[in-house]
């Protein structure tokens, strides 16, 4: 069952129960009060009438025509007369009288004898409320002393109308209740639909997002529970969208990497397999054998170099690099020795103690210098090192072909080579700078590349110092 | 003996190893091969020479494969792209631009040869018929004629015959022959020898198909002029 319906039926049910209970209570209370008042009234009337009758009969018992109270029949007649007078006076036809002799036998009665059979009419201490002929009545009995004769007078008061009134009230209430419930039903139905509308909206947006429209939001304002839920939902959708975008980007980068990598492998493999297949298929002449072997060798070396660099790249990602304080000039000395046959390189470095990993720092500088050598077309390359306030700044500067803005941006992506046809005349697969980037990162630094086409290129990075 | 005679191919590939690989094989097949290493040189050569087929790499310095293709289109020279760009998109683009075939690196050299022959066959009807020694082979119908009579050969015998003809005058290693034609790694019993025997018998080529000691077999064809 839907929430709106739940709200509706719950409210209706609550209203119905509460009102019914309240009204029942009220009506019953009302009824009891009325009854009580009526009973009191009847008692008073009865007492009044009893006294009146008593005094009248007393007077009569002093008169002669009743044989001074001895003539019972006459006395009864007088009593009957007085009683009918009472009835006229009060104009309440609900009062019926029963006159009994002291021993309980009925002398006069407005009520048929047959109906009185089971009743006890001599109890002067207690009122009785009984049902007589389908009517609710009240019986009060008192003793009347008229001279020597003692009578019992039972007044029978009809209370049916009070009960009738109660039933009428119940009926009225029932009709009003139904009308009210109907009105409430309509009103609450409308209200609950209105209040649950934001939930529908939320549901719809959820489904849109599930279908891939990650940018959608609910946009529900409001401070109630639904508003809060919407706000949290929108925040979640925000995080969702940016995470997916980041993952997509990662995936694209990974795919690009894998694409380049497999391309780098395919070409040497084609050559190696092609030449090897030729050698094993048939006898070749000496020069062909030599050529084939040569190519197999060089392409094989290329693959070897590639795999070493790949390993380097991967291991830089996973292991923790240890850095120790060392003299920068120590590494410079190693480089000078490595490149001793070249006079293109100009080393201009101040001494300083830097926090670095010796092997990696050497690799980093060697890669940068190799790149510069490939690009610089024979012009001099300078390697500078300067002590600065907080850091040691290293720069490798060449005056070669340079790169434009776009190339600079792409330069550190794995396998990227600025020359679009991936010229392999100088060897290498474009992994050098990615490795440098990782080494720099391991030293808490990053590579800054500045370059302009045809004017050369400068790559700098900082090292932490220990004074 | 028209087997690739006078067919001039231009190989445009900047990777020296691949270029040499193709050149050596295609030359062995009897084609005349020129090699260039960038787009501009390719255009110059196409202008100067008269080529029957172009083998183009796509990613080249100076001009890329597509540029060369559009330059060569009006000359109606068939083109085969040879490239590492192997996605479906790339292939479709290559073929739609007008290439006659598209070969993705890494490729088996056998496949290259087969495709070259296929493209040339389409362009030159004469290629269909091979004349070797005293037989004529209709490669489209896969039928072999000798002195006006049809020689019945099984599939494998036919393929073995073609293989010998393609590599004529070259000593071929027996297990490689077996592998290329039958596909299994290790030769079963003496299948190859049996087939050679049958070929010799059916064609009367006991002297033409020579056994090479410690190597395998060789089809000897008298040196062609030119």
Image: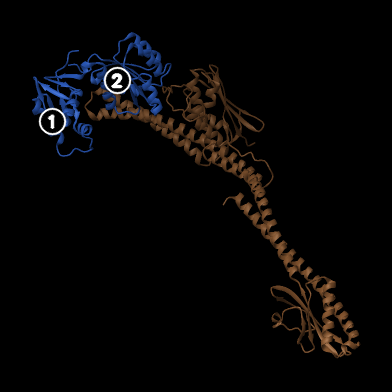
Chain colours: A brown, B blue
Are there few (<14), some (14-19), or many (20+) residues within 10 Å of tag 2?
many
In three-dimensional space, the C-alpha distance between marks 1 and 2, rounded to whole angstroms, equals: 30 Å
Q: Is residue A446 above or below residue A54?
A: above
Nearest the camera: A262 or A461?
A262
Q: Quadrant of the C terminus of chain A?
A: top right
- Residue closer to the observer: B131 or A32: A32
In the depicted structure, whether residue A110 falls above or below residue A202: below
Q: Is residue A435 above or below residue A181?
A: above
Q: Mark 1, chain letter?
A: B
Give the number of the disc on residue A27: none
Q: Residue furthest top?
A: B48
User: Which one is nearer the viewer's eye here, B159 or A232?
Assistant: A232
The label on residue B23 is 2
First in residue order: circle 1 vs circle 2: 2
In percent of width and height, residue A387 lies at: 63, 29
The residue wearing badge 1 is: B196
Is residue A417 rendered to the left or right of residue A129? left
Camera-nearest label, 1 or 2: 1
Residue A66: name its quadrant: bottom right
Q: Secondary structure at mark 2?
A: helix
Instruction: Please indicate whether residue B201 sits to the left or right of residue A160 in the image.
Output: left
């Amino acid at each position: 069952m839907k929430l709106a319906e739940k709200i509706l039926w719950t409210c209706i049910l609550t209203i119905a129960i509460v009102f019914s209970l309240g009204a029942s209570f009220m009506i019953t209370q009302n009824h009891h009060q009325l009854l009580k008042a009526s009973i009191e009234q009847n008692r008073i009337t009865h007492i009044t009438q009893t006294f009146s009758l008593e005094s009248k009969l007393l007077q009569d018992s002093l008169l002669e025509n009743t044989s001074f109270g001895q003539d019972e029949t006459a006395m009864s007649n007088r009593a009957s007369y007085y009683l009918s007078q009472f009835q006229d006076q009060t104009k309440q036809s609900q009062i019926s009288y029963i006159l009994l002799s002291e021993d309980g036998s009925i002398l006069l009665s407005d009520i048929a004898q047959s109906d009185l059979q089971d009743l006890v009419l001599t109890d002067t201490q207690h009122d009785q409320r009984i049902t007589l002929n389908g009517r609710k009545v009240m019986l009060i009995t008192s003793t009347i002393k008229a001279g020597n004769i003692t009578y019992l007078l039972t007044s029978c008061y009809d209370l049916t109308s009070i009960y009738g009134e109660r039933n009428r009230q119940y009926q009225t209430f029932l009709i009003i209740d139904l009308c009210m419930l109907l009105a409430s039903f309509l009103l609450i139905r409308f209200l609950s639909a209105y209040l649950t509308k934001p939930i529908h909206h939320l549901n719809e947006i959820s489904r849109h997002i599930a279908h891939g429209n990650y940018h959608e939001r609910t946009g529900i304002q409001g401070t109630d529970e639904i508003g809060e839920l919407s706000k949290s939902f929108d925040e979640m959708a925000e995080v969702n969208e940016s995470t997916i975008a980041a993952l997509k980007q990662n995936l694209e980068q990974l795919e690009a990497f894998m694409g380049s990598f497999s391309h780098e492998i395919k070409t040497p493999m084609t050559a190696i397999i092609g030449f090897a297949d030729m050698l094993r298929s048939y006898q070749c002449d000496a020069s062909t054998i030599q050529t084939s072997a040569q190519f197999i060798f060089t392409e094989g070396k290329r693959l070897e170099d590639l795999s070493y660099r790949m390993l380097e790249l991967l291991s830089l990602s996973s292991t923790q690099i240890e850095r120790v304080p060392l003299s920068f000039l120590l590494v410079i000395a190693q480089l000078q020795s490595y490149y001793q046959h070249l006079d293109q390189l100009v080393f201009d470095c101040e001494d300083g103690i830097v926090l670095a990993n010796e092997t990696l720092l050497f690799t980093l500088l060697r890669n940068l210098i190799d790149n510069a050598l490939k690009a610089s077309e024979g012009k001099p390359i300078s390697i500078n090192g300067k002590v600065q306030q907080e850091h040691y700044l290293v720069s490798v500067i060449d005056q070669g072909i340079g790169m434009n803005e776009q190339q600079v941006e792409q330069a550190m992506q794995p396998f990227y080579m600025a020359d679009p046809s991936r010229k392999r005349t100088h060897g290498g697969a474009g992994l050098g700078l990615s490795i440098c980037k990782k080494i720099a990162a391991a030293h808490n630094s990053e590579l800054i590349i500045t370059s302009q086409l045809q004017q050369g290129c400068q790559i700098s990075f900082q090292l932490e110092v220990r004074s | 003996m028209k087997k690739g005679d006078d067919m001039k191919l231009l190989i445009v590939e900047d990777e020296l190893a691949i270029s040499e690989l193709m050149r050596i094989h295609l030359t062995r097949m009897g084609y005349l091969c020129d090699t260039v290493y960038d787009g501009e040189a390719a255009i110059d050569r196409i202008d100067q020479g008269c080529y029957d087929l172009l083998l183009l790499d796509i990613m080249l310095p100076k001009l890329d494969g597509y540029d060369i293709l559009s330059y060569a289109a009006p000359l109606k020279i068939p083109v085969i792209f040879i490239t590492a760009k192997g996605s479906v998109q790339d292939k479709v683009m290559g073929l739609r631009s007008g290439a006659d075939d598209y070969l993705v690196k890494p490729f088996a050299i056998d496949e290259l040869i087969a495709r070259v022959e296929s493209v040339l066959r389409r362009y030159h009807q004469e290629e269909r018929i091979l004349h070797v020694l005293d037989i004529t082979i209709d490669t489209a119908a896969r039928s072999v004629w000798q002195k006006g009579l049809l020689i019945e050969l099984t599939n494998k015998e036919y393929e073995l015959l073609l293989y010998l003809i393609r590599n004529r005058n070259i000593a071929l290693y027996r297990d490689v022959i077996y592998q290329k034609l039958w596909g299994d790694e290790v030769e079963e019993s003496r299948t190859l020898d049996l087939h050679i025997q049958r070929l010799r018998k059916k064609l009367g080529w006991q002297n033409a198909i020579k056994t090479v000691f410690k190597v395998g077999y060789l089809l000897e064809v008298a040196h062609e002029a030119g």
